Amino acid sequence: MSYDKSETEYRLTTRGWVHNDALLPDDIVVERWLAKTYQGSGFGKESTHGERCSVNPAFSNEERDALHKQFPAPWSDEVKEQAAREFSRSLERLMKS
């Protein structure tokens, strides 16, 4: 039996990633994704992966690839590591003041 699991819908747009609750014109939505998070036990590590649900055919593969390079997925290790570094820097500044 799993301890915890959740799904969050994201959309990749020409301006970056947004949660599903944002109202957006269809012409800027490039892809729709589900970020699925699973934690096997209360002491286990969370695991998150993305699953693409739909693609706007108005955008070419090259355009989509360029947007993915410009805007890494919110659940990616790269984004998580960047957030951790920014948090550490903010904490250091707070401790110095």
Image (cartoon, rainbow, N blue to C red):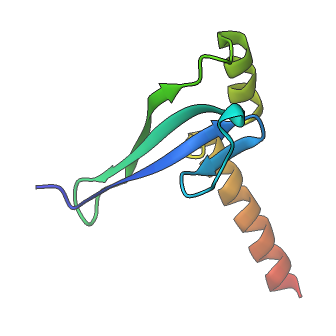
Tell me what residue is drawn at x 76 percent, y 34 percent. Answer: 14
Q: Residue furthest right?
A: 97
Q: Residue furthest left?
A: 1
Relative placement, left or right, of 51 versus 95 is left
Position in image of residue 16 (x %, y %): 73, 41
Q: Can you say whether 49 is above or below 40 in the image?
A: above
Position in image of residue 18 (x %, y %): 64, 49
Q: Nearer the viewer, residue 50 or 47?
A: 50
Position in image of residue 49 (x %, y %): 42, 38
Quarter occupied by the C terminus: bottom right
Tell me what residue is drawn at x 70 percent, y 32 percent. Answer: 27
Relative placement, left or right, of 71 versus 9 is right
Relative placement, left or right, of 84 versus 8 is right
Q: Quadrant of residue 70?
A: top right
Position in image of residue 41 (x %, y %): 22, 60
Tell me what residue is drawn at x 17 percent, y 55 percent. Answer: 2
Q: Is residue 97 visible?
A: yes
Q: Can you say whether 60 is above or below 1 in the image?
A: above
Tell me what residue is drawn at x 68 percent, y 28 percent. Answer: 68
Relative placement, left or right, of 55 versus 39 is right
Q: Nearer the viewer, residue 75 or 10?
A: 10
Q: Residue furthest bottom?
A: 97
Quarter occupied by the N terminus: bottom left
Q: Is residue 72 visible?
A: no
Q: How many marks?
A: 0
